[in-house]
Image (cartoon, grey):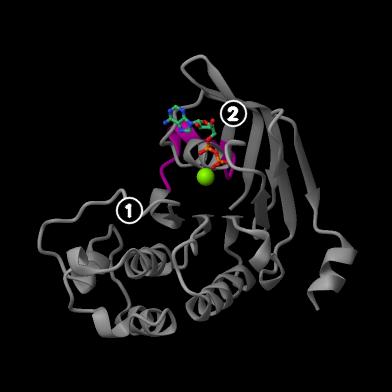
Amino acid sequence: MQIDINNLSFAYGHKLVLDKLSLTLNPGSFLVIRGKNGTGKSTLIKCLLGINLVKNGMIFFDHNDVNNFKGWTTVGYVSQVIDEFNYEFPLTVNELLSITKLRKVKENRKLKLLDQMGILEILNENIGSLSGGQLQRVFIVKSILNHPSLLILDEPTASIDKNNVEYFYETVNQLHSEGTTIILITHDEYLDCYNYSHVLQMNPDLSYAFRKRTATEEKEAE
Ligand SMILES: Nc1ncnc2c1ncn2[C@@H]1O[C@H](COP(=O)(O)OP(=O)(O)O)[C@@H](O)[C@H]1O
Ligand SMILES: [Mg+2]
């Protein structure tokens, strides 16, 4: 999916958080967003997802304004804070993964992804009984079940231990190699594990640097 961001500004009340941010991502790009806490990374993602409402003309998916975009089933998303979810109703992991607008969830793919993320054994457990890290992984599987055209990940591995993180970035790199456009907020510690193509640096003074991955960075990752 192609993404165009055009002079995007966003404020919570009087507090300006995003100030005239512009960038273009061609289909199949893999963008990493970096920046200190509070620089607006999650806010930007919520603008992309239509959670934070923006004016017409600021965000386009495949040349469609986000405000008229109809292809949400092709977008996967894992939010930063899963703990905000409160599932007290009796729903199993398997049932949660079946609630989808998709015509058909491929059984094999579902089981393989659950296995890769180390949570196959909780398939029939109630989601209310899971740890934060397990629930996070369930949402990761849900976000990538359908081979999304666009996958947006906001510090998705914050509450997951190292072993499972490894499977996670392998899966993300696999999707990228299949043509999925990826936007990822992550900590530097894992940066070299991803085959990212672009970097957006967000600064506390609301300035931004958007660039391609440099040859030096690719060398260091080897
Ligand atoms: N829902 C909200 N209402 C008001 N202010 C918010 C809200 N969400 C975030 N902010 C503020 O916007 C700024 C950017 O936050 P955020 O986008 O979460 O940054 P990051 O993800 O880079 O840490 C912070 O100052 C934060 O306090
Ligand atoms: Mg954030």
Q: Nearer the viewer, residue 130 or 66?
A: 130
**What residue is rendered at 59% in x and 28% in y?**
58
- Which disc number belongs to residue 83? 1
- Which disc number belongs to residue 58? 2
Residue 122: give x, y in percent of width and height: 25, 79
The answer for how far apart the CA atoms under marks 1 and 2 are is 30 Å
Q: Amino acid at mark 1?
A: Asp
**Which of the two marks, 1 or 2, is nearer to us in this view?**
1
Residue 45: give x, y in percent of width and height: 52, 42
Asked if labels 2 and 1 touch by Cβ distance under 8 angstroms, the answer is no
Q: Quadrant of residue 16?
A: top right
In the image, which residues are magenta? 60-71
Say whether disc 1 or disc 2 marks the residue closer to the N-terminus. 2
Q: Is residue 203 left or right of residue 217?
A: left
Which quarter of the rendered picture does the C terminus lie within? bottom right
Q: Nearer the viewer, residue 5 or 153?
A: 153
Q: Is residue 79 left or right of residue 21?
A: left
**What residue is rendered at 33% in x and 63% in y?**
132
Furthest residue to the top?
14
Q: Amino acid at mark 2?
A: Met
**205 versus 198 height, above or below:** above
Q: Secondary structure at mark 1?
A: loop
**What residue is rendered at 51% in x and 56% in y?**
153
- Which disc number belongs to residue 222? none
Q: Is residue 185 left or right of residue 128?
A: right
Residue 123 in magenta stretch: no
Q: Residues within 10 Å of mark 2 (few under 14, many from 20)?
A: many
Residue 50: give x, y in percent of width and height: 43, 36
